[in-house]
Image (spheres, rainbow, N blue to C red):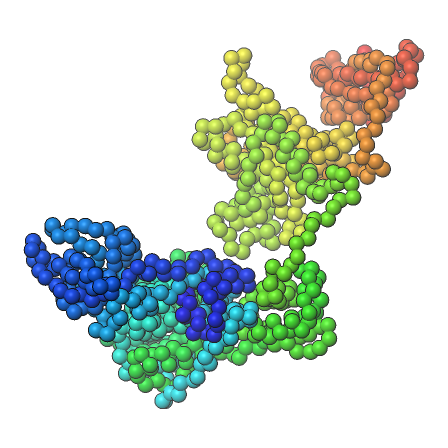
Amino acid sequence: MKFTLSWLKDHLETDATLDEIVERLTAIGLEVEDVDDKSVYKPFVIARVLTAEKHPDADRLKVLSVDTGDGKPVQVVCGAPNARAGLVGAFAAPGTYVPGIDVTLSVGKIRGVESHGMMCSERELQMSDEHSGIIDLPEDAPVGTPFAEYAGLDDPVIEIGLTPDRADCTGVAGIARDLAAAGLGRLKTPAVEPVPGSGECPVKVTIEEPELCPGFALRLVKGVKNGPSPAWMQRRLIAIGLRPINALVDITNYVTFDRGRPLHVFDAKKVAGNLVVRRARDGEKVLALDGREYGLTPEMCVIADERGVESIAGIMGGEESGCDENTTDVLIESALWNEMNIARTGRDLGIITDARYRFERGVDPEFMVSGMELATRLVLDLCGGTPTAPEIVGYRPYEPKVIRFPFTEVKRLVGIEVPAGEQTEILGRLGFGVSGSGVEVDVSVPSWRKHDVEGKADLVEEVMRIHGEDNIAPQPLPGHGAVNGKILTTLQIRTRLAKRALAVRGMMEAVTWSFIPAAHAELFGGGKKELALANPIAADMSDMRPSLLPGLLAAAQRNADQGVGDVALFEVSATYEGDRPEDQRRVAGGIRRGTAGLAGGGRHWAGNGEPVGVFDAKADALAVLEACGAPVANLQVEAGAPGWYHPGRSGVIKLGPKVVLGHFGEFHPKALEALDVSGALCGFEVFIDAIPEPKRKPTRTKPKLELSPFQMLRRDYAFVVDRDVAAQTLVRAVAGADRKLIAGVNVFDVFEGASLGEGKKSVALEVSIQPVERTLTDEDLEALTARIVANVEKQAGGVLRG
């Protein structure tokens, strides 16, 4: 949002300097992004041409003697057709930067004659596009004085960066209101007086879609004379980057930036019959004022007459009904539009205009009619004409929103004490109505803040903006009770540990989209209606992801398509099972492709690497769980992984019968086909938020190291069991025979054959036995063996192989 200092002072009576205004704007949340103090125009002075002689070697050039006010005439070579003795204009000396031509002047020779500067045209000083001759000032213009001050070019331009919620400051008047509330002057924005009309407006308006257009005001002004707008208006529009077109169009642009109220003017003679506000019909097109033709859809709102679409509502008018130098009758339109519809239409059509910028943020509904009255007054003052009475359709007066506001809320949210009287005064200066007494009051929201002030916290923000956030005293961070006290949450710590563990295992971190196609979401257990995005950024990003694996698999395939097939990727991020906060999970997931095992992938002279498989994924998953503090020794691995895994090469990791900590395995061929992914692939997901919190210990000191002085023993056992009995069942049965002596159980062989019987298999286990109190005797070992055999027979139905 740009404006000039003089423009601001039309609405704000203040003695503050430019620096003070800039500082205060940033302090109240209207951050200043740039200030052009117009210092580039300071070197230009008013000068008089004393003589104008023909150039000896060029018919179209003249050699001028120019008085710059210091009594020492300078020689200037000039090619302007209006250069003559006695002309008073703008002079630039050598060393001056001329903005209109982007040149820094120097002393030079033109056709053999030295030129010490130049007389400037309006285009060279960016005053207009006029370049047919040099600036011709009145005879009484003060020679030797700064030209910028004389011509009004010394008016600084301020640019602020508006946040989307501050729609009230898209006009200079709204910015002045904030500065006045901040104590930088007195607000003097003049009230808009209604313009009396003669007769009814002959053009009637019908609103077919009230939800898209809550109000519409229209007025006809007959007998206008359209032409260039006055110099003061052109200077302001040029200063903020707009190109003056003609008086009627410039008036609408001026009101847009002056009051934040976009308007539109129709050439009344080009409008056929009455106007109707409706949805566009499928296939309709409109030639807009930017010279481009746009195809419309039924989701878009338009203003149409009997011939068809005349304007894209709230965004851009149509070329067919635009005003030009021949316009004599004009329709002035001021309306209210649905903010979401304006934003969606502008995005779909790729149109960015000043009107769209304001309407999609929300304009002041109470200024709809006043904006039309202000534009009418400017049209009458600049173009003449006779207005009719306004045609106002659909508008309902604004009913202020009332918020129950406790003064203690400022202290609660911000931490500083602001007296209740000061809070009341601040809110009143900002236009809020405060009623009641005591510790709580009722605050009514003004119409220009209806779009962004919703509750108590917004009122606290308003109070603190004006009171001054720099009044919040710096506070040191609270100290922790112990050295190296815990700062991060458990989930933050586990996230870091999981990332470190997987990176150490040679995997690379990826950051994938949280949005995936609906088909992929359904494939991986998602696809719920509440997780479908209402406004997706792309058709293939329509649903919140229920799993990290689809994104990682797609990333691996993209790498493979580029010739990098052996990749190991991981991500620690959120997945979504529903639209409630508790349905968001923190998951560590990873995939390996090709030969990207723990030792690395690719070819080697000693032999090609083995393709990744289920045990690579299992090892990764267990590494994450161990790093995050899960009791790995007590975990159980069972069949029954989700359907996107291979049913015979996957598993579920549990802690007890109910707590699922993750799953791993090779992927189901149908899942890979649906994702259009190929290759040897395995993966895992670990739910790090499901790992139980460790028990609090009375001390942070590590326990002493307990080492047995007795040598560890190893004994091998082979058990014959049914083929469908999992090896893990045998391991648990053996380990449970004596938890004090048995330090570990490892499966080292599986055998199936006819000699064992139909449906049988032999599983060989290595059992590590660690004596603690004394050296074990043969009798001790036989007793332990008996307990192991009995436990296996009881829990797994196995017998010791003979």
The answer to whether residue 241 is left or right of residue 186 is: left
In x, y percent, where is residue 550? 56, 39
The C terminus - image quarter: top right
Q: Residue at x 81, y 32 (%)?
A: 701
* Closer-to-camera residue (34/721): 34
Which image quadrant is residue 427 in? Answer: bottom right
Q: Position of residue 297 (x, y in %)?
A: 41, 62
Extreme-top residue of the structure? 778
In the picture, the quarter occupied by the N terminus is bottom left
Give the x, y percent position of residue 611.
56, 23
**Residue 361 visible to the viewer:** no
- Residue 295 image point, x, y percent: 36, 60
Question: What residue do we see at 78% from left, 20% from top?
Answer: 745
Q: Is residue 13 left or right of residue 132?
A: right
| Closer-to-camera residue (255/577) | 255
Task: Please say if 420 is above or below 98.
Answer: below
